[in-house]
Amino acid sequence: MTLLIAALGVLGVASSGPLMAGTLGATSVTALAIAFWRNAIGALVMATPVVVREPKAFGKITRRELGWSVTAAVALAFHFACFITALQLTSVAAATALVCLQSAWIAVFQLLRGTRHRWPVLLGLGIAFGGVVAITGFDMGSSPEALLGDLLALAGGALAGLYTLAGGKARQSMGIGTYTTLCYGICAAIVAVLAAVSGQPLVGFDAGGWLGIIAITVCAQLVGHTAFNHLLATMSPLLVSMTILLEIPGAAILAAVFLNETLPAGTYAGLALILVGLAVVVAGQRRGRPEADRREAELGTD
């Protein structure tokens, strides 16, 4: 069952970039509208079974659970703002690969908290950084907009790492329905504020735009994100991030087939470096997990 859920999650998140890029390019839908509706609808769908089965579940949320859920929601909101905007400026493949650096960011965050990583983790970070340099270098030569898109995707990856870490803490004691409802709902509220400030409309789109929003919500949010949030209860955040790495080749293939996206050979080499580097990072993290867990316990991560 775990493998099936992981496979569905990969398919869901891999379709996210191509679906969003296609919707943004073919309709009048805005970046923040996509972020708002996928979270608002996701929260509503996930809340329904919780309310039916356990009406008082939301009243039992502790301050600790609320704190981690809010942290995850804030990170998720700004992650979407960065990533979806990046898809308008750079290629789907580059944006997806750079935002998938979340597992590398998790390793960096742990380093900052005092965790001592094994040498393969540091080697993997170096390889992944080489991929970032390759992608951004080629985009720097193509257009300033593409480079800005790369930087936004990098920021989105850091925020995704924070979202994954905070979600892992919340899911230690929260049910999947309660957590996702709270996280998606707060995220939607934050995005609505961002949309109001930036002047991006959340309604008034044509039928094609709404169809795109529904497809993104079902595939990426309800299937992709929810599958990985479910896995956080039984798998470490780093192992979940390792599985998400399959989004990189998946999104590149889908973008090439459905959006006719072609990239310079150097960019594909950068994608490969990031994928290999992140795999080394997570493999090294798994081998050194007992030491990491001991250090986290000493630091009192809760």
Image: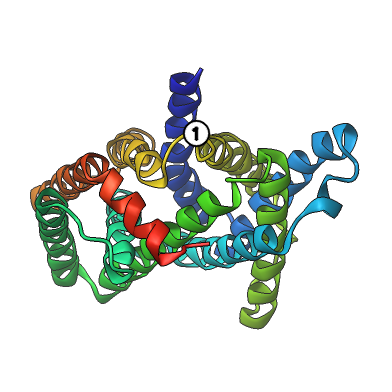
Residue 198: quadrant of the picture: bottom right
Residue 176: quadrant of the picture: top right
Looking at the image, which residue sits at the far bottom? 197
What type is the residue that disc 1 sits on?
A: Thr
Residue 18: quadrant of the picture: top left
- How many numbered marks appear? 1
In percent of the image, x 62 and y 38: which residue is there? 222
Left-right relation of 82 to 186: left
Label 1 environment density (alpha carbons within 10 Å; few <14, some 14–19, many ≥20): few
In depth, the one of 42 and 195 nearer the eye is 42
In depth, the one of 296 and 6 nearer the eye is 296
User: Could you say where residue 197 lies in the image, as x and y percent from the top left?
Assistant: 66, 82
Residue 196 lies, with reference to residue 244, above or below; the image says below
In depth, the one of 237 and 92 nearer the eye is 237
User: Could you say where residue 35 lies in the image, as x and y percent from the top left?
Assistant: 60, 58
**Mark 1 = which residue?**
234
Residue 9 lies, with reference to residue 229, above or below; the image says above
User: Could you say where residue 150 lies in the image, as x and y percent from the top left?
Assistant: 29, 66
- Residue 87 in sight: no
In percent of the image, x 54 and y 60: which residue is there? 76
Secondary element at tag 1: loop
In depth, the one of 222 and 298 nearer the eye is 298
User: Could you say where residue 301 lies in the image, as x and y percent from the top left?
Assistant: 47, 62
In percent of the image, x 38 and y 62: which residue is there? 298
Left-right relation of 182 to 161: right
In percent of the image, x 49 and y 35: which residue is there? 12
Left-right relation of 248 to 273: right
- Residue 210 in sight: yes
